[in-house]
Amino acid sequence: MSKIQTAERVSCEASDNFVYQRSVLAYHEAAKRISGDVLEIGTGSGYGIEVIAPHATRYVTVDKFHAIQGSELPDNVEFLQTTVPPLPYPNESFDCVITFQVIEHIRDDVRFVREIHRVLRPGGRLILTTPNAPMSLTRNPWHVREYRVEELQNLLSVWFSKIEPMGVVGNERVTAYYERNRASVQRLMRWDILDLQHRLPRWMLQWPYDILNRRNRRRLLQEAPDATTSIRMEDYRLTDYEPGCYDLFFIAEKGVKREEE
């Protein structure tokens, strides 16, 4: 079994709908803010390509796995299978970089951010999302780390001159699903009387976590199908950072005069 099949890869499967719809929102919000030559780090299954491509002159999207469904891409889209960092592109190659739900998987996040800064042109923009750590229901062993808003802001501020911290929040329908999910996870965690989720190394927990996570999502779908499938992108919105947001959504701009270090 490869990581491509894990619950970490958001799909349009009904049980993933809570996560999928807010992931789609990120692409639509990014599409309002991008132009020119665009690099995406973390293609996933490619469901964001059709949203971003019409707004880019050239759209390069990279991923560790070759997971794009279908073989045909729009004429202005290129896909590259590679592991990052580093990024295999010259300095100042792109006007925008987008990367959604990726940085939490990167061991060397400092190098990751530095590489993004390097390939951006002066005045270029990074748009990034990642889970808001206080809203996570349990330890996710697929993540190297998760960020609080101040942690991500401090990381980005080393390289970027202007940073706008925002967040993805949901309405009552989204909150109701989140609370049901939290109650279900808490019931599962009662069996972890030795607190193994925090004691064991990540690699030992990844597949058990993934199996339980997938089963939990499907059980929630079975118990209340409408509560899961009725969530739409419009039930989420992007706002200035709020402590209860599900995802951090950061926009960072590269200064026009700063020299590469």
Image (cartoon, rainbow, N blue to C red):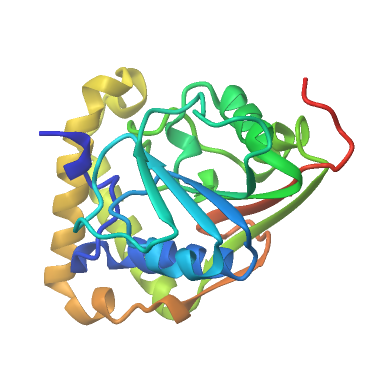
Residue drawn at x 34%, y 69% is 177
| Rendered image quadrant of residue 13 | bottom left
* Image position of 118 with respect to 261: above or below: below
Residue drawn at x 26%, y 62% is 16
Residue drawn at x 38%, y 73% is 176
Residue drawn at x 24%, y 65% is 12
Closest to the observer, 95 or 75: 75
Indicate the quadrant containing the N terminus: top left, top right, bottom left or bottom right.
Answer: top left
Is residue 171 shown left or right of residue 12? Answer: right
Q: Residue 103: percent from the left, percent from the top? A: 50, 37
Closest to the observer, 39 or 126: 39
* Image position of 202 with respect to 17: above or below: above
For this orientation, the residue located farthest to the front is: 75
Q: Residue 22: percent from the left, percent from the top? A: 43, 66
* Image position of 14 with respect to 217: above or below: below
The answer, for residue 82, to whether it is visible in the render is: yes
For this orientation, the residue located farthest to the right is: 257
Q: Residue 23: percent from the left, percent from the top? A: 42, 61
Q: Residue 86: percent from the left, percent from the top? A: 51, 24
Count of all numbered marks drawn on residues in the image: 0
Is residue 54 shown left or right of residue 153? Answer: left
Indicate the quadrant containing the C terminus: top left, top right, bottom left or bottom right.
Answer: top right
The answer, for residue 131, to whether it is visible in the render is: no
